[in-house]
Amino acid sequence: MLHRLLRIALAIVACAALPMLATPAAAQREVTNPPPVWSHAATATSFPETLGDFVRTTVYEYNAEGTDASVGYDLVRGGKKLASVTLYIYPPYTGGGCAAEYGAVKDGVAQSKAYQNVKLISEAPAPSPTGRTAGVADLATFTYDFGFGGGQSRPVRSEAYAFCAAHGAWIVSYRATWPSDIDVSQDVAQLFRAIDWPDTLDNR
């Protein structure tokens, strides 16, 4: 559960461009100067520096083995940040199966004290990471007030996605956040599909 809380805290940082929250140094590590294509070694999933208009901003590992990791991307157009997305790959921690893992991802939004006026506006089945298999993942969409990009608090929209991969051996999830007055949901979907997910992470 500690790993879960650390990921939630860092997702808040990534989405808001706020200073790093204090976490135990041994529990999480920023990968400094990652290569142009950084790979999650345990699953052979690659994350390039850029994908379309998305720019990779952070790489974190949350355990010594590097199996629990996240990669952050910002959607930037015309020099303006339009969205923040954090992609996660990690072994399951809840012990409660896929439903519990999805619940933990949702709780990262619903129970955050950093957000105001949180509303769950929809939940729906979602495709696998590559999009080849429909209805095998879960997607929740929220609205809340927050200082996106470190600015003044304003309405934002946030997606929380979770997929149990490889017969539950891995969890693939993401958090994506953008101002409510724009719609970049298709851009976020394209980013997710653009990752070269291995077949092991596209099978339930």
Image (cartoon, helix red, strand yellow):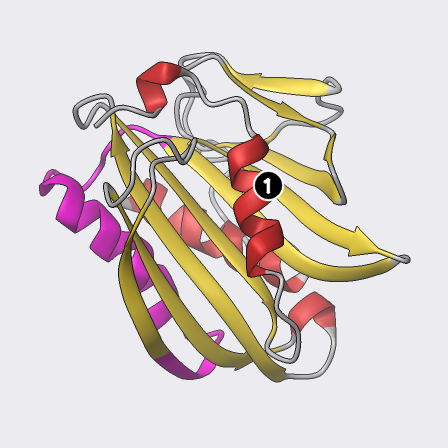
- Residue type at mark 1: give it: Leu
Looking at the picture, tell me which residue is in the foreground, 139 or 173.
139
Residue 183 picture quarter: bottom right
Residue depicted at x 18% and y 28%:
168
| Front in this rendered view, residue 95 or 1 | 95
The residue under label 1 is 191
Q: Measured along the vertical axis of the image, is residue 194 above or below residue 3? A: above
Where is residue 62, by image quadrant?
top left
From this view, report whether residue 40 is shown above or below residue 180.
above
Residue drawn where x is 40% and y is 34% of the image = 129
Q: Residue drawn 77% across and 60% down?
A: 81
In the rendered image, the quadrant that contains the C terminus is top left
Residue located 70% across and 50% down the image: 74
Horizontal side of residue 4 vs 53, given as left or right: left
Q: How many marks?
A: 1
Q: Is mark 1 on a helix, strand or loop?
A: helix
**What's the magenta region?**
90-119
- Percent position of residue 127, x then y: 34, 42
From the viewer's side, name the closer residue of 202 and 71.
Answer: 202
Query: Does 93 appear in magenta?
Result: yes
